[in-house]
Image: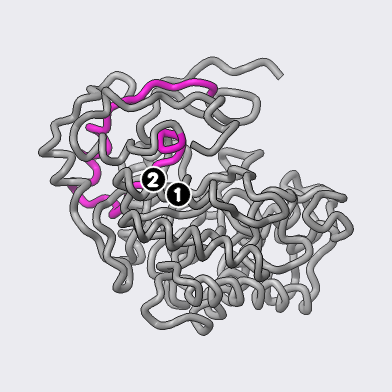
């Protein structure tokens, strides 16, 4: 596939030297999520790195996250971690969040981040029908989804039975309880990008005729029951974050909610079930989600639910999603003036940063002190190692 032309972002033409006082005032404000006080408004977005052989994170993973905490990140959301279900994952090198060895490794990660002054939550993940037959960590397990369909709507794997649904819900709850037990500061549920929870939310992949399918309110039942089970498994003050998106890996315009009313129908049951914050994943944080209003997706979430919101999408990059793998080869460090404009008016509460933090562990400190001109640019070669 030929590589697409680079796509400039609005920040590419802005200043890389945003005034330190303004950045510190806007991004340096503490923020509270159900009793968890973040020292600032910068989060590290979850990014799969595949440096955990047989699902066990080692000292290199702990050091990788601790460097970002020491570099000023207020909240770290880990890479996606597999819950304890045979079909949850597709790689031997993506970390698990179950089992003695993996949890011991994760406990050391949490301790390292806390020692560096940071806060950290694991992202709990089931890939659903994005998994191909024969993929690890359990090659014999079949792909599963709400209706036995892949993201293209074609037959793939098998439709989940009631027992399958119950088992997956229990697996999420067990991992959430483990996160609290070993010292994490909360959890995030991965309900975005076409993975299992999102497959239930999206009509293309959910064609069930039981109580888990049908209209949008019914399609939220699986996600709602996961939130309820997680909430019951952890303390009342243990933060639960829910990540969702209006795009999929193979369909950037796939929107479960076509407007504010449908978005409210999707989110309200989850908020009522116990979600403390929503992490609204967009490819470009500055784009309006619906016609007629400048609010981005996180802005709409905050307006409709009143819950804490995290936004994300190409912060600090001058081009994004340009290659056949969906990732930019190289980017330049860019300014954050437009981001500060939106955060000054409290459109959303926290901004998550992805590739810019892979490139430069101290990006957050440079942003807070007006030194983004010194930030290392992202390069795809950064993915070859944890640094």
Q: Is residue 311 above or below residue 357?
A: below
> On the picture, is 133 further left or further right than 43?
right
Taking the spot 66% from the left edge, 73% from the top edge, the residue there is 171
Question: Residue 339: within the magenta?
Answer: yes
The residue lying toward the viewer, choosing from 265 and 171, is 171
Q: Which residue is drawn at 64% across and 50% down?
A: 52
Which residue occupies the foreground of this view, 374 or 311?
374
Q: Choose top left, top right, bottom left or bottom right for residue 209.
A: bottom right
Residue 93 location in percent, x, y? 69, 48
351 within the magenta span: yes
Within 10 Å of disc 2 (Cα), the crowding (few <14, some 14-19, many 20+) is many
Q: Which contiguous range is marked in magenta?
A: 329-358
Nearest to the observer: residue 376 or residue 269: 376
Q: Is residue 202 something that shows in the picture?
A: no
Q: Which mark is residue 68?
A: 2
- Number of dots carrying numbers: 2
For the point 25% across and 36% down, the residue is: 367
For numbered disc 2, what is the local secondary structure?
helix
Query: In this image, 60 relative to 337: left or right?
Result: right
Q: What kind of element bears circle 1?
A: helix
Residue at which label 1 appears: 65
Whether 4 is drawn above or below 286: the answer is above
Q: Residue 27 location, x and y as percent?
A: 22, 46
Work out which residue is located at the far front of the displayed protein and give it: 59
Cβ–Cβ under 8 Å for marks 1 and 2? yes
Residue 327 location (% of width, % of height): 56, 29
**Gap between marks 1 and 2, in whole Å?**
5 Å
> Residue 265: horizontal and vertical position, in percent?
48, 66
Q: Quadrant of residue 271?
A: bottom left
């Amino acid at each position: 596939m030929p590589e697409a032309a680079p796509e400039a972002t609005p920040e590419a033409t802005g200043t890389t030297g945003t005034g330190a006082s303004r950045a510190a005032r806007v991004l340096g404000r503490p923020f509270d999520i159900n009793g968890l006080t973040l020292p600032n408004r910068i989060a590290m977005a979850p990014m799969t790195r595949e440096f955990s052989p047989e699902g066990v994170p080692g000292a290199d993973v702990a050091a990788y996250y601790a460097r970002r905490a020491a570099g000023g990140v207020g909240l770290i959301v880990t890479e996606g971690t597999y819950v304890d279900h045979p079909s949850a994952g597709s790689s031997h090198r993506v970390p698990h969040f179950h089992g003695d060895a993996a949890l011991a490794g994760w406990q050391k990660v949490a301790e390292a981040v806390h020692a560096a002054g940071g806060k950290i939550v694991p992202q709990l993940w089931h890939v659903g029908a994005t998994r191909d037959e024969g993929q690890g960590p359990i090659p014999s397990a079949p792909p599963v989804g709400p209706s036995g369909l892949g993201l293209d709507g074609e037959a793939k794997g098998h439709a989940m039975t009631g027992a399958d649904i119950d088992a997956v819900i229990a697996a999420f709850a067990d991992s959430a309880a483990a996160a609290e037990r070993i010292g994490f500061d909360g959890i995030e549920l991965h309900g975005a990008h076409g993975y299992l929870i999102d497959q239930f939310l999206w009509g293309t992949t959910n064609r069930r005729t039981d109580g888990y399918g049908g209209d949008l309110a019914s399609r939220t039942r699986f996600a709602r029951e996961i939130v309820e089970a997680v909430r019951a498994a952890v303390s009342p003050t243990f933060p639960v974050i829910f990540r969702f998106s209006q795009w999929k890996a193979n369909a950037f315009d796939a929107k479960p909610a076509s407007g504010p009313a449908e978005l409210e129908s999707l989110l309200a049951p989850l908020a009522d079930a116990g979600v403390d914050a929503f992490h609204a994943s967009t490819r470009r944080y500055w784009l309006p989600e619906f016609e007629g209003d400048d609010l981005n997706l996180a802005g709409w979430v905050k307006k409709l639910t009143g819950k804490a919101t995290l936004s994300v999408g190409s912060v600090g990059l001058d081009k994004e999603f340009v290659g056949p793998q969906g990732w930019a080869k190289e980017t330049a460090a860019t300014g954050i003036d437009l981001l500060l404009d939106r955060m000054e008016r409290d459109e959303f509460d926290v901004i998550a940063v992805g590739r810019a933090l892979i490139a430069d562990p101290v990006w957050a400190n440079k942003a807070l002190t007006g030194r983004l001109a010194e930030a290392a640019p992202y390069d795809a070669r950064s993915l070859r190692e944890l640094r």
